[in-house]
Image (cartoon, rainbow, N blue to C red):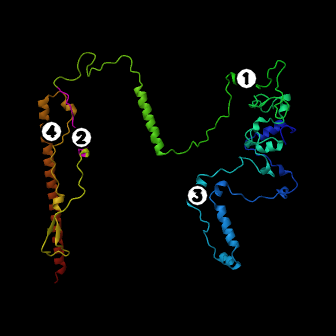
Amino acid sequence: MHDVTARDPKLLVLLKATRNSVPVPRHWCAKRKYLQGKRGIEKPPFNLPDFIKKTGIMEMRAALQEKEESKTLKAKMRERVRPKMGRVDIDYQKLHDAFFKWQTKPKMTIMGDLYYEGKEFETRMKDKKPGELSDELRTALGMPVGPSSNKIPPPWLIAMQRYGPPPSYPNLKIPGLNAPIPDGSSFGYHAGGWGKPPVDEFGRPLYGDVFGLTGIAGDTILLDEEVDRTLWGELESEEEEEEVEESEEEEGEDEESAIDQSGLVTPAEGLATPSGFSSVPAGLETPDMIELRKKKIEAEMESNETPQLYTVLPEKRTDRIGQAMMGSTHVYDIASATTTQKSSGGVELSLDPSELEGLDSESMAARYEQTLREQQGNLAKEDFSDMVAEHAAKQKSKRKRQQQQTDTKQAKKYKEFKF
């Protein structure tokens, strides 16, 4: 049932446009069983897709079938009991390319579409385009097929010139009706002629530019727009990202260099304030270079001295093994490798910049010496306190061991005493 033949077309259109509605198949009212009308149609064998055929599996199967046909019945029964697996061996790279590189999407039905008898034999309208004649249609109409086939008009052109273009496609360009005919062709009713152009009593075209006058005047002819079918979700490689970043940096540098430098330049007169007073107190000189702690680390990193990979321990020979259970005649001096070298650099100090404001060079030197003495005194105190704490801990553990030994001796005396 179609919209034009329905008793209530508005109700039918409303039912079709309802959300989540699906069409009812045609065989719902048929009296014969489902798919019984395909009895006379021979089902073709399954055809492998092209990307699987390229792997060469069909040739390998054919060779195996020929080999099996030449075998005796005894060999066939033996293989049925003990079959051999993995006889069709295909290169892994070929299989990978077939399924991950050359695989094509199969024909699938849209959402809500149902199958009915004869659906696979219907013409796919999505593959067809109005105005373009396929080779099958040209052959059926007796028209030539080839590169120069567009110079022969279709047989319905005469009727279109008489009754007008198809109303369903008002913007369709048809040569000889509303578009110019191909080069080398002519109007007329002879063999290969394009009929009579549709014009009014004053010789003006009725449906469009049939003589191609606007194209000569400079009007551009609209061609089919090319569609970009590249995948937008592909991951870019690291090399492409680096090239994009480099191009962006070059564009940024070009924009910075192209900045207009015209106009007035604001003079920068150091730290002078508009009132005329200098913000730097008198008596202080700005040092040319300020040494920071990290400069020392950077200098060590930039030095060309290669760090020592290992240390050779001096070997000593001993004639006597002594009372050692696993003695050796070779002894290595580890003390020479573990001794730390005294740093030849100066002492590092941290000074507060706020305390140095308003001081001259002599007061700054005195402040530096005072901080140096305090730091050295603190280091000596820390070293001495650590030694005292270590000595006190040793004495405490020694007294504890002696107390435990005396307690055990007294307990033994009490146990061994007998009346």
Q: CA distance from mark 1 to mark 2?
A: 81 Å
Q: Is residue 292 magenta?
A: yes
| Label 3 Cα crowd, 10 Å radius (few <14 / some 14-19 / many 20+) | some
**Dot 2 alpha-carbon crowd within 10 angstroms: few under 14, some 14 to 19, many 20 or more:** few
Residue at the disc numbered 2: 295
The mark closer to the camera, 1 or 2, is 1
219 lies above or below 20:
above
* Residue 77 visible in the displayed image: yes
156 and 19: which one is in front?
156
* Percent position of residue 375, x then y: 15, 43
Few, some or many residues within 10 Å of mark 4 (<14, 14–19, 20+):
some
**Alpha carbons under labels 1 and 3: distance apart:** 57 Å
Labels 1 and 3 touching (C-beta < 8 A): no
Q: Which mark lies nearer to you, 3 or 2?
A: 3
Query: What residue is disc 1 on?
Result: 213
In this rendered view, identify the residue nearer to me: 166 or 356: 166
> In terms of sequence position, does the residue under pointer 1 or pointer 4 come before the other?
1
**Would you say the residues marked 3 and 2 are in contact, meaning their CB atoms lie under 8 Å apart?**
no
Residue 263, compared with residue 47, is above or below; it is above
* Magenta residue span: 284-300
Q: Which mark is residue 142?
A: none
Is residue 219 depicted above or below 154 in this figure?
above
Q: Residues within 10 Å of mark 1 (few under 14, many from 20)?
A: few
- Residue type at mark 1 is Leu
Which tag, 3 or 2, sits closer to the chain's start? 3
Considering the numbered disc 4 on the image, is that residue within a helix, a strand or a loop? helix
Q: Which residue is mark 4?
A: 371
Residue 42 in picture, x, y percent from top left: 81, 58
- Residues tagged 1 and 2 counted as in contact (Cβ below 8 A): no
As measured in the structure, the alpha-carbon distance from the residue carrying label 4 to the one carrying label 2 is: 22 Å
Mark in the foreground, 1 or 3: 1
Q: Tell me if residue 130 can be seen.
A: no
